[in-house]
Amino acid sequence: MIVKVKNNSQQLYRSEFTKSSIYKNNKLSNFKSINSFSVVIQQDEKLHLDFVSKDTIDERANMLIFSPVQLELNAEKNIFQIANKKLLKVQWNKYKEKNRSGKNNTFLFLYERLYFKVDLGMEYDFMSNSAHLPFFVNIYGQDLEIGSVIDGMSWLHTPLNLPLKIEYIVEKFNEIELTLKGVLSLDEENLGKLIADKQFQQHAKPYHFTKDFTISSDIKSIFDIRTGYLVFSSCAYKINSEQEEINESVDSKVSFV
């Protein structure tokens, strides 16, 4: 069975996303959002995904929503890279000047560095803090069968700064739909590279070295075989450690509107 892309067809989605991240009794993340967005997939020499936000209900006031966000697959690295960062920098500058104050200058500086100066920082934030993660898997043009394993994305998960990866297993398919079961795990190879990096060592936490935490996940994605578009995805995972005092949970759903 081979999935092909119906180029330039647009699909509207509705998503729900909640995230709570606690480290040593400090809340690193705690938010809930509901968002509508459209996706256009195009496959020529590279695979492209274009996300356009439609509306958002979010607990955070003055939330920054980058839109459109255009990504293209770097097949060699197996990562989707944002291709329109110059346009997004204009959006960021407008947001920054509107919200600048003595109280949040440090916050704005840190996020500007993450988005525009750290390699793949914006991409990793996009994967870690939105419901878009299930879109980032290249299922196209491959001869798939029941039990086939597909490498999803590897990314540096924020704010815990843990390298994670998703692997998908083909669970079932028919003439209309392809169902994948996802498994989230620690990317041991990338963690080894990170803790050998002197710059990363300055910000590393004890759990990067002890690896004393557990990751549990329940991920399911359904794709339309006729168009290549994601139909529905539920993605829930937890990262926990009593010893390291880590407690993070994420629950997100995406579906056709």
Image: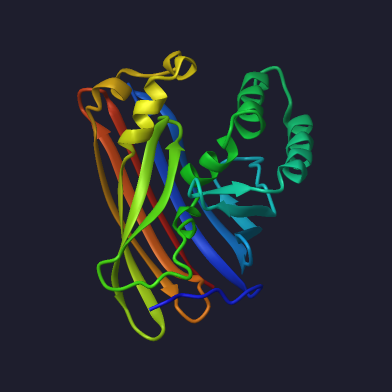
Q: Is residue 62 left or right of residue 2?
A: right
Residue lying at 63% horizontally and 19% vertically, measured from the top left: 106
Along the line of sight, which residue is nearer the eye, 45 or 29?
45
Q: Position of residue 207 (x, y in %)?
A: 29, 23
Residue at x 37% of width, y 74% of height: 178
Using the rendered view, name the quadrant where residue 94 is placed: top right
Residue 210 horizontal/vertical position (percent): 24, 22
Position of residue 109 relative to residue 252, above or below, is above
Measuring from the top left, give residue 79's x and y in whole percent.
51, 48
Picture quadrant where residue 247 is located: top left
Q: Position of residue 233 (x, y in %)?
A: 40, 64
Side (left or right) of 89 relative to 137: right
Query: Residue pushed farthest bottom?
Result: 175
Can I make out residue 70 in this image? yes
Lateral position of residue 5 relative to residue 3, left or right:
right
Which picture quadrant has residue 60? top right
Q: Residue at x 44, y 29 (%)?
A: 28
Please say whether residue 54 is visible from this viewpoint: no
Q: Who is closer to the viewer here, 191 or 10?
A: 191
Q: Is residue 251 above or below residue 61?
A: below
Task: Tell which of 147 and 87 is nearer to you.
Answer: 147
The residue depicted at 79 percent of the width and 40 percent of the height is 90
Q: Quadrant of the C terminus?
A: bottom right
Count how many numbered circles sit on residues in the image.
0
Q: Which of the image's four quarters has the N terminus?
A: bottom left
Up-down: is 148 above or below 248? below
Colouring of the image:
rainbow
